[in-house]
Image: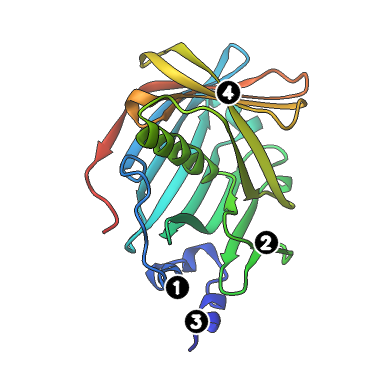
Amino acid sequence: MNTRSRWHSCHRWPALAAGCLSLLMSIPASALSPELLVSTTTQYEVYRDNKQLGVGKIELKPAGTPDCWSYSQEAYPSAWLRWLSGDILEQSHVCVVDGQLRPVAYRYNRSGVGASKENFSLRFDWPKKEVVYQNGDVKPLTDGIVDRLSMQLVLRDWLLSEQAATGKEPIGTKEVKFADRKKIDSYVFQIKAHEEVKTPAGTFKTTRLDRIDNDKRRAQFWLSPDNGYIVVKAEQQKEDDPPLKLLLKKMPTTSPTNSK
């Protein structure tokens, strides 16, 4: 079976085993920032405005094939809210190819009221340069496009690389193109400030990234340069809706295990 035929056998998320992921490895992987791809589990508290909704976690771990990783983000509302908002799982499988993070597959799954309209999955067909949606839609795929979860890794790698190259706090802007629920989209982030942030895990010096390309959809991330630019606080807000906020609950647990 040729490479393209083997790729098209990977139609469903459970089928993305080592054989499917290995199709991305025709180009030797180059190292990203050594602080980026480390097995890590990070726990957060989740708030709507100033009211705690529940807890969540972000986990990065080897995917079972050299240079490939599973990256997931989960949120668990408190019991009295679970029937309405439900649990949320975002999961991305990525591989390092020619010094870039390349997504293999992505899914978003939420339980609760109205979830069926939001849930979706993607697979990234690099041999054919296509993003294939669960409903059968196809969008063109070019180098640099990621999914909306692995975008976090791209931003962290940008900050880590800039800091390593200059020895100073990074400055400037970064555009990230990604496959969203219905289209290929892009966000532009700018380093806006260096601020001290208090969280349940402690107080941190942070670099603040703001989304600057859409005034109606605010997104801000506070990342700790002393801890590999992990997210210690995040806020998102659509127009006049109450903001959704994440705060670091405890310092992440890490493991020296990697994908090699």
Q: Secondary structure at mark 3?
A: helix
Q: Amino acid at mark 3?
A: Thr
Q: Amino acid at mark 1?
A: Leu
Residue 22 in picture, x, y percent from top left: 40, 70
Residue at the limit of the structure toward the left, as seen here: 256
Residue 136 in picture, x, y percent from top left: 72, 67
As displayed, is residue 105 above or below residue 47? below
Mark 3, mark 4: which one is toward the viewer?
3
Q: Which mark is residue 23?
A: 1
Mark 4, mark 1: which one is toward the viewer?
1
Look at the image and tell me in which quarter the C terminus lies.
bottom left
As displayed, is residue 223 above or below residue 24? above
Q: 163 or 93: which is nearer to us?
A: 163
Q: Earlier in the sequence, mark 3 or mark 2?
A: 3
Q: Residue at x 41, y 69 (%)?
A: 27
The residue that mark 4 highlights is: 80
Mark 1, mark 2: which one is toward the viewer?
1
- Whole-number angstrom distance, CA of label 3 to CA of label 4: 49 Å
Q: Amino acid at mark 2?
A: Tyr
Q: Residues within 10 Å of mark 3 (few under 14, many from 20)?
A: few
Q: Amino acid at mark 4?
A: Trp
Q: Residues within 10 Å of mark 4 (few under 14, many from 20)?
A: few
